Image: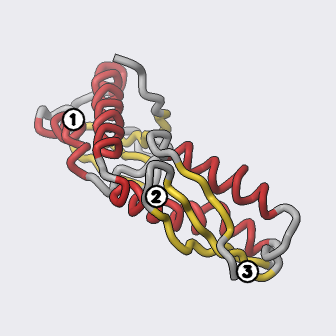
Amino acid sequence: MNAVPVHPERTDDPSVVRWHLGRSLADHPDVLRPVRQLVADGVLDAVSVEPLGVSTTLAPGRCWALDAAAVRAGVQDAVREHRRHVVALDDAGRATLVSRLTGEVIADLVGPLAVGHGGSIEPVEARPGPVIEVGVRLRGACHGCPAATSTLHDRLEAELRRRLPEVELRVSAAAE
C-alpha cells in the first residue's frame, strides 16, 4: 500500500490534531468512513472536515503517543478512497469537481493576489473531456497583464493539479 502524504498540525487544544491533506473531502463525506470508524471504536471523539484537511479530536482517556498511527492510517485511507472516487467519476463529474475547486482556489489563493494588483480573476467554466478545460476571465489590471500567464499556470493550474492529481486539466483565459 503506497503512502499518502498527510501533515499533522497541533492546535491550541491538545486533544485536537488538524491533518493537512491539500484537498477537500467535503464533496464526498462517505470517504471519511475509515476515520469515522475510529469514532465508533472510541479512539476519536469527533471528526470534522475543513477546506484542505480534517480535524480529529481524541476521545477522553486516549493519548496521541499511542493512537496517532491509527488516526494517520485512517486519514490516509480516507484520502485513498477520495482518489478512487474522483477517478471513478465521468468527465462531467470531474469537470464539476474541478469547477468547484477552481472557485475555491481563486477565492483563497489567486484572487487575493489579483485584487492586490488591481484586477480580478473569475471562473467561467470547466468543460468536460479527457482533459478538463478550465476557463477563467481576467478583469481590470489582470486583463492583458504580462504576468497573467504565470498567475494562471504557475499558481492556479499548479494548485488545482496539487489538489487533484488524478485529473488532467488545462487552464486558459476566456475571451472577453
> Compared with residue 140, is residue 5 higher up or lower down, i.e. above or below?
above
Q: Is residue 133 above or below residue 138?
A: above
In the rendered image, the residue lying farthest to the front is 129
Give the distance between the C-alpha atoms of the residues marked 2 and 3, in whole angstroms. 21 Å
Residue 99 is left or right of residue 41, and the answer is right
Q: Position of residue 118 (x, y in %)?
A: 81, 78
Residue 139 bears which disc, if any? 3
Q: Which mark is residue 20?
A: none
Pick the residue in front: 36 or 95: 95
The answer to which of marks 3 and 1 sits earlier in the sequence is 1
Name the residue type under label 3: Arg
Residue 64 position in % (x across, y down): 35, 27
Q: What residue is shown with label 1? A: 34
In the rendered image, the quadrant that contains the N terminus is top left
> For the residue labelled by badge 1, is the local secondary structure a helix, a strand or a loop?
helix
Q: Which residue is mark 2?
A: 98
Tell me, yes or no, if residue 144 can be seen here: yes
The amino acid type of the residue labelled 2 equals: Val
Q: Residues within 10 Å of mark 1 (few under 14, many from 20)?
A: some
Kind of residue at badge 1: Pro
